[in-house]
Image (cartoon, rainbow, N blue to C red):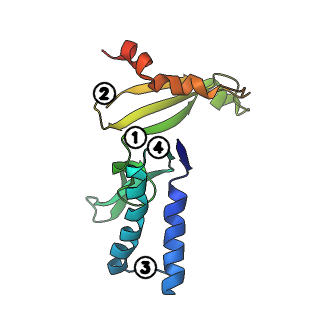
């Protein structure tokens, strides 16, 4: 297997290198085609690889402008996406968005979170095999990591576990 953490960094580095090479501070629209062609070389290699590849990406948001009744325009959040190249969410076979939700008690105390005060929610946004589309998985946070604790979260996605979880 191969882990890319974070998917956003290679894209940012490619943009910086491209700007430096072309001696520009800002890229113009017509340069994006060349930049995306170079990026596509990497994603094509990744998709053709016999390895299982896990991409961790930073969460970004889709924004648009909306005109209000009084004629002013406001920014409106339309949804979420993985930061990076605009087609980043289309590449993986399995796309999961994660959110950490802190319990009300921990939020009110404003102290370091205790075991179980944060629940991680995993929303399956895309599953190429259509087995997990729309599913949500939850697991409690752990503050004191012990060897093998990662298995608690990863087992949620194992086929043997899913056989019991599917309707």
Answer yes or no: is residue 24 visible. Answer: no
Kindly report the distance in space between the C-alpha atoms of the residues bearing marks 1 and 4: 17 Å
Answer yes or no: is residue 104 visible. Answer: yes
The residue that disc 4 covers is 51
The residue that disc 1 covers is 95
N-term-proximal mark, 2 vs 4 = 4
Q: Nearer the viewer, mark 2 or mark 4?
A: 4
Kindly report the distance in space between the C-alpha atoms of the residues bearing marks 3 and 4: 34 Å
92 or 44, which is in the foreground? 44
Residue placed at 50% from the left, 79% from the top?
A: 19
Please indicate whether residue 49 sits to the left or right of residue 103 in the image: left
Q: Residue 164: x, y in percent? A: 39, 12
Kind of element beneath mark 1: strand
Q: Nearer the viewer, mark 1 or mark 3?
A: 1
Residue placed at 36% from the left, 69% from the top?
A: 37
Kind of element beneath mark 2: loop
Kindly report the distance in space between the C-alpha atoms of the residues bearing marks 3 and 2: 40 Å
Please indicate whether residue 61 sits to the left or right of residue 71 in the image: right
The residue that disc 2 covers is 131
The residue that disc 3 covers is 27
Kindly report the distance in space between the C-alpha atoms of the residues bearing marks 2 and 4: 21 Å
């Amino acid at each position: 297997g191969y882990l890319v953490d974070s998917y956003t960094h290679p894209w940012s580095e490619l943009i910086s290198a491209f700007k430096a090479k072309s001696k520009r501070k800002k890229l113009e629209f017509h340069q994006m085609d060349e930049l995306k062609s170079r990026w596509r070389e990497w994603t094509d290699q990744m998709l053709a690889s016999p390895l299982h590849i896990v991409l961790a990406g930073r969460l970004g948001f889709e924004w648009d402008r909306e005109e209000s009744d009084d004629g002013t325009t406001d920014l409106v959040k339309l949804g979420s996406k993985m930061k990076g190249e605009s087609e980043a969410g289309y590449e993986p076979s399995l796309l999961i968005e994660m959110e950490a939700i802190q319990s009300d008690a921990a939020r009110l105390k404003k102290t370091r979170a205790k075991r179980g005060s944060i629940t991680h929610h995993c929303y399956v946004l895309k599953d190429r095999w259509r087995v997990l589309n729309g599913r949500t998985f939850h697991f409690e946070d752990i503050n004191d990591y012990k060897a093998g604790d990662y298995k608690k979260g990863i087992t949620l996605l194992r086929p043997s576990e899913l056989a019991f979880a599917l309707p």
